[in-house]
Image: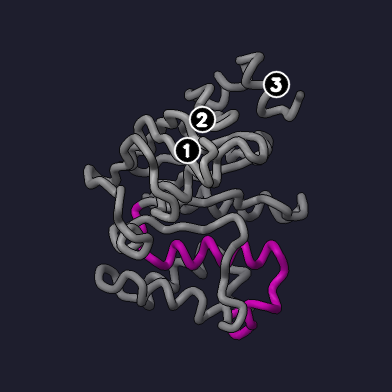
């Protein structure tokens, strides 16, 4: 479904990504793990068209994404929830979710897509009339993912969905992400803490200083001493 091959990205003259390659197949949950500043967000921003690669390819369902604007990538079926959530503070929860159905018209009815978002994140149903500025950090994360889901995507790209959340909130959001994959959607998520990676992750990539240093199952990652040092936060 998603194929990233030999991706190089520089920002303001500094090379951030060095030959990054990863892939996500239909219905898979794939995690990109790395310390802060390792290149996770830059990888996701390149996939979504916010930054232009210097080299490499990004293909979604065998279609190249390079050069496409972000809204066109979304229209192809890629939903994105950024690290800062980026919800519309001036809109209600319901309006934030519904706006995704306008971004990608066609396909399943908008009401059905909105209902699915609420089914996956039932907490938001009771906050439908609440303004975005009145939400907690965890509620904003839920809303950001719910809005991406209401796009009716084949792939959701979630940048640090657990960042800054209270430990008590993380399991619920992690379970909701697993539910999304069980509903037939693929998910690619970035995470700094290996312990937050959902247990049903199909494949895990570890990125360090802009390079992929490991690709395999979470079990294999734990068995690799170098990977354990990186994802465990050791110096």
Q: Is residue 137 above or below residue 225?
A: below
Which residue bears the numbered disc 1? 30
Circle 2 Cα neighbour tier, 10 Å, few/some/many (<14 / 14–19 / ≥20): many
How far is disc 3 from disc 1 in space, using C-alphas?
A: 20 Å
Are circles 2 and 1 on residues that touch, CB within 8 Å?
A: yes
Tell me which corner region of the image, top left, top right, bottom left or bottom right, holds residue 105. bottom left
Q: Which residue is at 52% across, 22% downward?
A: 214
Give SS at disc 1: strand
Q: Which residue is at 55% across, 41% downward?
A: 40
Which residue bears the numbered disc 3? 229
Circle 1 Cα neighbour tier, 10 Å, few/some/many (<14 / 14–19 / ≥20): many
Which residue bears the numbered disc 2? 205
Relative placement, left or right, of 51 versus 230 is left
Percent x, y of residue 73: 33, 57
Pick the quarter of the image with the N terminus: top left
Q: Is residue 5 above or below residue 181?
A: above
Earlier in the chain: of badge 2 and badge 1, it is 1
Q: Is residue 184 above or below residue 199?
A: below
Nearer-the-camera pick, 148 or 41: 41
Answer yes or no: is residue 62 visible. yes
Q: Which residue is at 72% across, 27% downward?
A: 232
Nearer-the-camera pick, 108 or 62: 62
Percent x, y of residue 28: 41, 40
Residue extent of the magenta highlight: 128-154
**Outermost residue toward the left?**
62
Nearer-the-camera pick, 213 or 31: 213
Type of colouring: one colour
Q: Which of marks 3 and 1 is in front?
A: 3
Give SS at disc 2: strand
Percent x, y of residue 229: 70, 21
């Amino acid at each position: 479904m998603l194929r990233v091959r030999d991706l190089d990205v520089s920002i303001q003259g500094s090379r951030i990504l060095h030959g990054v390659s990863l892939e996500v197949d239909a219905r898979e949950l794939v995690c990109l793990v790395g310390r802060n500043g390792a290149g996770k967000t830059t990888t996701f921003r390149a996939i979504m068209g916010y930054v232009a690669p210097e080299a490499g390819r990004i293909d979604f369902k065998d279609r190249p994404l390079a050069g496409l604007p972000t809204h066109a990538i979304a229209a192809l079926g890629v939903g994105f929830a950024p690290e800062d959530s980026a919800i519309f503070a001036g809109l209600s929860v319901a309006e934030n979710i519904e706006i995704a159905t306008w971004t990608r018209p066609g396909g399943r009815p908008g009401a059905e897509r909105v209902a699915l978002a609420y089914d996956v994140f039932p907490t938001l149903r009771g906050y439908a009339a609440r303004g975005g500025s009145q939400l907690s950090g965890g509620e904003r994360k839920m809303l950001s993912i719910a809005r991406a889901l209401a796009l009716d995507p084949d792939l959701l790209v979630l940048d640090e969905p657990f960042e800054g959340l209270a430990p008590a909130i993380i399991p619920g959001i992690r379970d909701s992400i697993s539910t999304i994959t069980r509903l037939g959607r693929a998910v690619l998520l970035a995470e700094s803490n290996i312990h937050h990676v959902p247990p049903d992750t199909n494949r895990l990539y570890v990125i360090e200083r802009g390079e992929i240093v490991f690709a395999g199952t979470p079990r294999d990652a734990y068995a690799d001493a170098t990977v354990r040092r990186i994802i465990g936060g050791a110096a």
